[in-house]
Image (tube, rainbow, N blue to C red):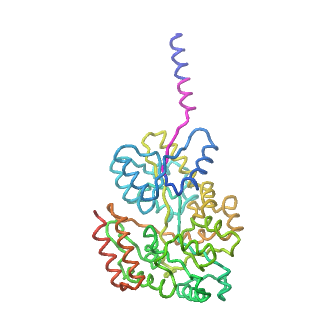
Amino acid sequence: MLKKILTTLAMTVAFAGVAEAKVTITCLTNAGHLTRQHEPLAKEFNAMQDEIEVIYAAPAKNYSDTHLKLFRGSATNTLPDCAFEAYNQLPSLARALVKRGQVVNLDELMAKESADWKDKNFTSQMLDLGRVDGVQYGMPFNASVIQYYYNADLFRKAGLDPDKFPTSYDELFAAAKKINALGDDIMPMFQYLLGGDDWGFQTLILQQGGRMMSDDGQSIAFNENNYHVNAMKMARRLVTEGGAVVNQSRKTQFAAFTEGRMGMWALSPAGARNAEERVGEAFDLRSAIFPVWNDKMGRLPTGGNAAIITAKDPAKIAAAWEYLKFVTGPKGQEITAKITGYLPTNKGSLAPEYLGNFYAKNPYYATPSKQYQRAGAWAGYPGTQSEKIWRDQKSTIRAVMLGKKTPEEGAADLVKIAEKLMKR
């Protein structure tokens, strides 16, 4: 009898120990995002409960390095428990991890939430950013739809109304010419096409109502309806009519803008806080939605990343899901949006107690929330040569912008480059 009591007591103590044990999960992100937003989020989450501890692995350098680290981790069975993968690289990663049973189907976890949980928190369009082949492998965390920042003081000096930012490209170029006339030391606008990835190029395709890839993601579609030719014509117009400078680094142009020597700057809302800190009180800094060619069908590629779960242990999967729900939930998105300026991915975060009142008092930060319906997919190419494809395409686009190739020649080259390399 005594032996039975002692056995029962031991089991009770053991179960109590298990119940009280803290589950630790490790996540991966890149260096540019770690200290700015992930450390504050993990600190907040760890402080609000005592069952789960979130720590971050040594960060990747950037999105591309994150992608490579996850592929290496897959091959060596050293994946983290969760990670934040760029939207355009998620399809190739997810398809590879699915074959090895190394990524969690989040549809199954969402199905265990309350019946109205999904509709209360996300639009279908936003969830699509984390879907691959119809399955939810990623929860949308950061969302970045291109917008304009502008110097309202230069608008006034040029005879423009700072309360009426251009709503079409013709109006944009007309404003650029007036700003350009203010003097040789003033640049009218930033060119957004030749950055570190093809986000700018995809912007020119999607805003026409076009798409980058076929539905199955295996064939290019940016050449449908001459969208690629039209895009290259616009790339040339950015220089000839907009006065955009091609042979100058983004860093140099950003300095010109924040110092008050550039009228308009088109880039991610993720730069809102940085721009505001750099400008200070130097001039009247404002933001505005990005004009698109096709108001009805036009979309803008959504940069940013989705949170994925790559743990295998059930306890760690459950813990990672709780963390993902927090960082993509109303409070997590409030914290992220205020720190960075990113478009909040959770529609519940627009409530007054989260971002609603903040946006009402700070219209400069509210611009992303006005572009929800424009958020489109940031597509990726099949295979492992996406970076090589963009490097070669970038050289072609630069040649078009400088007038060294015609838009038609450049458009044809863009197709050849992609079709030659994308399935390697």
* Residue drawn at x 43%, y 49% as measured from the top left: 104
Asked if residue 252 is positioned above or below residue 131 in the image, the reply reads below
Image quadrant of residue 417?
bottom left
Image quarter of the C terminus: bottom left
| Residue 173, horizontal then vertical, whole percent | 54, 86
Verify whether residue 18 appears in magenta: yes
Q: Tell which residue pokes out farthest to the front in this image.
A: 185
76 or 6, which is in the foreground? 76
Tally of numbered tags: 0
Q: Give the magenta-colored segment's residue range.
A: 13-28
Q: Is residue 322 left or right of residue 416?
A: right
List x then y, in percent, for residue 268.
54, 68
Q: Residue at x 37, y 52 (%)?
A: 71
Instruction: Name the residue furthest top.
Output: 1
Location of residue 235 in the rendering, given as x and y in whole percent from the top left corner: 44, 81
Q: Evaluate whether residue 249 shows in this view.
A: yes
- Is there any visible trace of residue 365 in the rendered image? no
The residue nearer to you, when weighing 415 against 103, is 415
Left or right of 75 on screen, residue 44: right
Closest to the observer, 143 or 225: 143
358 drawn magenta: no
Q: Quadrant of residue 160?
A: bottom right
Residue 190 location (% of width, % of height): 53, 77
